[in-house]
Image (tube, rainbow, N blue to C red):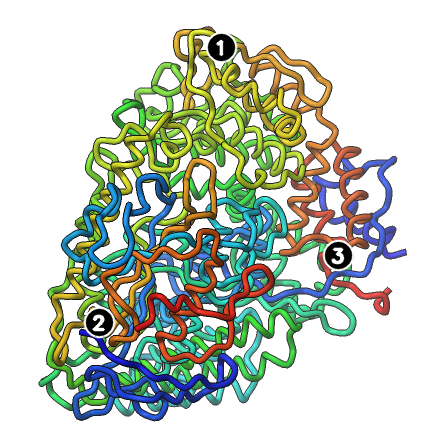
Amino acid sequence: MRALGWTLAVGLATACASDAEPESAPALPDVPAADAQMRRLTAEQYVNVISDVLGADLVLTTVLEPDTPSGGLVALGAARTALSELGVERYETAAFELAEQAIRAPESDLIPCATADRASADCLRAFVVGVGRRLWRRPLTVDETDVLVGVGVDAAQTLGAPDAGFEYALAALLQSPHFIYRNERPTPDALDEWALASRLSFLLWNTSPDERLLDAAEQGELQTDEGLSVQVDRLLRDRRARRGVRAFFSDLLELHRLDDMVKDPTLFVHFDAELGPSAREQTLLDVERLVFDLDGDYRDLFTTAQTHVNRRLAATYGVPASSREGFALVDLSPADGRRGLLGQVSFLALHSHAVATSAVLRGRFVRTALLCGEIPAPPVDVNTALPEPTDDARTLRDRNRVHLENENCAACHQLMDPIGLGLENFDPVGRWRSFDNGARIDASGVLDGAPFADAWSLAERLRAHPQLAPCFVRQLYRYAVGQDPTADEDSLVDVLAARFAAGGYRVQALLVDIVMSSGFRGLSEDAR
Amino acid sequence: MKLRRRTVLRGLLGSATVSVGLPILDCWLNDRGTAFAGGGGLPKRFGLWFWGNGILPARWVPPDEGRGWTPSEQLAPLRPVRDDITVVTGLDVKTGNSIPHWSGPAGMLTGAPLIVRSGEDYTFEAPTLDQVIANEVGGETRFRSLELGVKPAEGMSHNGPDSRNPPESEPGRLFDRIFGGGFRAPGADPTPDPRLRLRRSVLDAVIEDIRRLSPEVGAQDKLRLDQHFDGIRALERRLARLEEAPPNLDACAVPDRPTNDYADVDGRPPMPEIALAMNEVLAMALACDQTRVFTFGYTHPLNNVLFPGMPAGHHRLTHDEPGDQPLVNQIVISIMEQLRIFVERLKAVPEGDGTLLDHSVVFATSDTSFGRTHTLTEYPAILAGSACGVLKTGLHYRTTPGDNASKLGLTLLRAMDIGAPSFGVGEGRAETTLGGIEA
């Protein structure tokens, strides 16, 4: 009943979704949702919320507790890891650093009264209520407000300055667990309306709910299919959705590691500190274009022959550099040897060593992150040194042979090496090469029964792999709910994957499906 | 200096009191066994100094044993401090090797295997040695413990599953944390900054929020909130200590503030320079009794640091350099050089009749033994300092080869006056210490 009602609502409310509404797609099942967990804001989310609520001009020099991935995603690590003592201290330093700037900024509109009235307790109270609602993603209780006003009044009196009152109250808001954690605990019926607004906003915009979404939550609109789908649609159409989708792909593809990537500059003259960030931006621009401008097929990410390149990347790719700064779309052909994500520097360079390629690193990433395969750690006391190149065995493929010929190694390595060896034409910074130690590279192989001749055809094999799209659905679901699906939710994920396929593998439609599902909304048995 | 020591072991690890027989050197121990009397006693410190990617066992183990031992090739840089250190060889980590480079530290520092959820997803089961010790002595000082390292890294210090203590990796930020924001050196103006009290009142409000939230969350989340709560309380205590009178210790002085700018040279980080700056700040943090427990990561597990003159990163070389691995050998030697510099820095701080080093024990170890095959036998272990005369120094102590590495963990706990009956679990459990290095 619920699913049918939602389908109609979607058809009415959203132009995008309705004409792709699949006839043969199964309806989303109602499944008991997992117990929700407290999710700590990632460093990027923290900065986004500060920027949205306190002002985009604020500068944060304090380095926050690093994000830790778990099960391949920072989104899961944020729901699992405990905050260190140093992390607590850094939140305090950051809170005061930001509060001071926010209150003293001349154009700040955070304090809701005229300068003459700043010293009044009413002004302080109005400030706490207003800013608190945005920062904590829900209205503060009277008790909570009283405590914060008390802190502010104490500070203003002790330091003899009304502004100090606002600063200290704001610093308290920013250090509270209600700010630092997204508490998505279910009420008896569902995630409460505030938690749902929060989940929705962080998934689609990677930031806290805006005023309109908070108002919708307050009005109870998010508890209905119609109300929820109106908000999903609004958020997806907003430019901030690009930031949200970028955040997901950054997590999945580990793109943040590109900022610190190190390659030996004495060996790779094309490498410098700019390459990593440029490569990251290239991949994210391609993703944005596919998801928003084209509303295209996810699988095209692997076979597209168009990509964004700036002058820095043009040298690595061997394409003519634009005379202008910034990124431009270029066309690639089989002569370039590369297409799609596996041909991009972000993937190729990230999963290599500082001085050499690694078929295992590249293969393992594809197998685990993109195909959702499981690969255990290497056995104890095994000698992992690859043989040195010899006249008979000059290429990495030759030197890796023991992985596939030794039956103890092959069980796991057959899942990784063939993929990575298919990409050997790309050196550790992603530049094309035809030779390795003087021998011509053979990039042919077989991907789970499907043969390929080189990276160009490997891209097609990956696109056609039966696990590619279902794995993406699973990863996005995990990211959305912050944990691995329960056994019950597995059946939901299967249906999401079937609907994804039937609807043309469109990411926006998948996002809508996930948000509208019982798993995301934390709906219990009783509510149905 | 040799001293007799008589200790009375008390019950379970984690209880609040320790009873000790006799005072040692001028480390006066009060009835809690850890603090020093205002009249001139000195605290005992514990540190962990580690590097990544192990050693070459054939060139590590010294050819002879006992006092006056002949340094092996890789230990040669430590010759000038030979009498202040003890090298322990023959130890094996017994808790399995499911995740190379991490199973070793887990076994050596917790006596337990890693919790492994998948090839990519693993964590420490129990708190590491430094935190076990910090649980006992950390309440006495402003910082329960300090974690620092030369480059951003995960660090070795863990509190239990999914809970680690990331190190500070920038010398300037480390300085600000300890000596900035309200710290008053000995002899400074006794009036505390009023903002310290206001900061504590903010933290009180945060504590209230945690208290009210805690009953509403699930069991796992409650543990995480508990840890957050502990972190807030620790911060409150640190602020409260800043409001007290400055430390009454002769050697305490505020060092110069180091820069934060240690740019890479040709893509290679200036590790020795950064370490030097870190050593300065840490030595004074200890001398000013701001903490008694630290972990210092010169390089981290699995690191691929490009050392000067090397054609590839350290980790890469351990697996790919053929034959005797002369380049890997050179790297280990250069790391031991850094250990010597560190030990000398602690030795240069006079305290009472001795030095800061005399009143400490620093445990230097790595994430594996032979880097190429990730072995856990013949595990590297060096102790610097006598922990106030409790441990012997100047020895190469070779235990029965294959002996349980957890015995060293237990020995260190006892040296820090923690009367634990055992250390470690399962195969990693030890109930006896390495008597040969106890005074």
Residue A273: tell me if it is visible.
yes
What is the CA distance from the residue labelled 1 to the residue labelled 3?
Answer: 48 Å
Residue B25, position as x, y percentages in the image: 20, 82
Q: In this view, does B219 lie to the left or right of A339?
A: right
Tag of residue B285: 2
Using the rendered image, report if marks 1 and 3 lie on a common chain. Answer: yes
Label 2 crowd bin: few (<14), some (14–19), many (20+), radius 10 Å: many
Residue hosting label 3: A519
Labels 2, 3: front one:
2
Labels 1, 3: front one:
1
Q: Residue at x 28, y 42 (%)?
A: B332
Label 1 crowd bin: few (<14), some (14–19), many (20+), radius 10 Å: many
Residue B379, position as x, y percentages in the image: 41, 50
Towards the viewer: B386 or B252: B386
What is the CA distance from the residue labelled 2 to the residue labelled 1?
Answer: 56 Å
Residue hosting label 1: A441
Q: Residue at x 33, y 34 (%)?
A: B313
Residue placed furthest toward the right = A1
Which amino acid type corresponds to the residue marked 3 in the rendered image?
Gly
Do labels 1 and 3 touch, CB within 8 Å? no
Q: Within the image, what quadrant is residue A121 found in? A: bottom left
Residue A34, position as x, y percentages in the image: 74, 61
Label 3 crowd bin: few (<14), some (14–19), many (20+), radius 10 Å: many
For the C terminus of chain A, the image quarter is bottom right
Q: In this view, does A220 lie to the left or right of B222?
A: right
Residue A148: tell me if it is visible.
no
